[in-house]
Image (cartoon, rainbow, N blue to C red):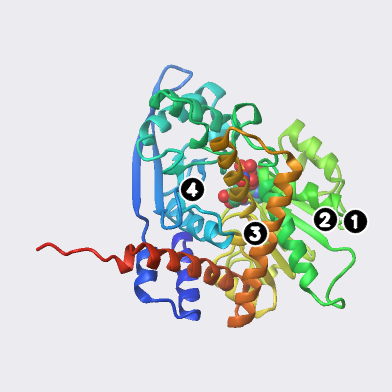
Amino acid sequence: MDFYKNTLFNMQKAAKIMKLDKESLEVLSYPQKTLIVSVPVRLDDGTLKVFEGYRVQHSELRGPFKGGFRYLPDVSLDEIKALATEMSFKCAVVGIPYGGAKGGVKCNAKQMSEGELERLTRKYVQAVYQIVGPRHDIPAPDMYTNPQIMAWFMDEYSRLVNEYRPGVVTGKPIEVGGSLGRDTATAQGGVYVLEEYLNSLDKKARKKNYTVVVQGFGNAGMHVADILHGLGFTIVGVSDSKGGLYNPKGLDIQQVIKDKKAKGSVTECKEGKCVKPHEILEKPCDILVLAAMENQVTEANMKQIKAQIILELANGPTSFEADEYLAKKGVVIIPDILANAGGVTVSYFEWLQNQQAYYWPLEEIKMKLKRIMQESFARVHHFKEEHKCTMREAAYVSAFDRLEKAMKLRGSGANLRCKIYH
Ligand code: NAD
């Protein structure tokens, strides 16, 4: 099943569990606005290439649209719609005052020079700037977009509106209005939720030394491996797009990070045995952290998964079929809209700091992030107990609860009280 259908299925399941008003589900099943743009870029060899770009704004019921943008060769409109929808639910799960959006450009960022990436980013901003803005829609980094790209985005937008507007985008470098702790936020938020889940287990179920496999070794994956390793978890496997590295005795994560940074892949590290990218998911471990991309655990490999706990730092990494199968087997999945919400939470802190032009120390950011992740886990746990459902279903219920209340209070969407003119 494709990612967008998967997201809609997750929504429908939760709506049924909580007996959500049908019209509320109907309204939230469609993005408010979908923009497709062409992005012409002069390449280094002098030729002109036109890239296709997207910005999907799903819902602004709870605040301005919010969501990253990605540079990937096979990014599709449906994928961006799914991600935008998930953003509305994610912001509602953690109770931060944003709606959901997502963007992307179909391009192979890995093969583009720095100059080409800068020109692409500036052209993308020129194509979407009329629908984004600090009080309207605030983009952020996602796959193959980084703080430098956010700095170009902010600079181009500020130039177009003739005013310094750091709050138009989050995930910027510290020197141009970024926040301390944003680089590790997604991973740190996931770790706070994982710790809460492990603390909720009874003493017998809790183990001393959990083994962990991490799929994906970019912003989310590398930091989560580093943080968990620092907390005493044994990281037995990691992977990136080139392949996996496995050692049942545990990997020295600092060495893996060093080799990844110096040589471009975890497979260049001599710490363990190299395996094919997908084989890492099937290796024995207690906790599997999915931190690469969507649709990684599917009907094709769900029976080979050995982990008892899955932490979804990536968006939509588990297909609907695999989700149902693993839930029946008793595997606990800490769902994306809760597990990776630390990223958007610290983005929210960055945006607040930009509005105030006053910057907070790292300790304050960590403390505020921890409190939000702990409270969000507790709220999801409450709905899980109330409805006797999975954590994913409970997270969607938790989000729907806030979205529907906002819809009813604002009188928009399904309950729009407007005159009908004939
Ligand atoms: P990134 O570009 O920094 O890293 C992506 C990593 O995934 C790279 O190491 C890449 O080699 C690896 N990868 C790609 N295809 C793979 C495959 N088939 N098998 C194994 N590894 C593969 O991206 P990121 O920011 O770390 O994002 C990763 C996921 O987390 C995405 O789904 C993204 O939407 C989600 N996410 C990221 C953030 C954030 O703040 N960065 C926040 C929320 C969710």
C-alpha gap between disc 3 and disc 1 = 27 Å
Q: Amino acid at mark 3?
A: Ala
Q: Amino acid at mark 2?
A: Val
Q: Residue at x 54, y 28 (%)?
A: 112
Q: Secondary structure at mark 3?
A: helix
| Mark 4 surroundings: few (<14), some (14-19) or many (≥20) residues within 10 A | many
Q: Which residue is mark 4?
A: 66
Q: Residue at x 43, y 38 (%)?
A: 133
Q: Which residue is mark 2?
A: 236
Q: N-terminal of the two: label 3 or label 1? A: 1
* Rendering quarter of residue 280: bottom right
Q: N-terminal of the two: label 4 or label 3? A: 4
| Mark 2 surroundings: few (<14), some (14-19) or many (≥20) residues within 10 A | many
Which dot, 4 or 2, sits closer to the camera? Answer: 4
Along the line of sight, which residue is nearer the eye, 340 or 265?
A: 340
Which dot, 4 or 3, sits closer to the camera? Answer: 4
6 in relation to 270, above or below: below
C-alpha gap between disc 1 and disc 4 = 41 Å
Which dot, 2 or 3, sits closer to the camera? Answer: 3
Q: Which residue is mark 1?
A: 249
Along the line of sight, which residue is nearer the eye, 174 or 314?
A: 174
Q: Which residue is mark 3?
A: 339
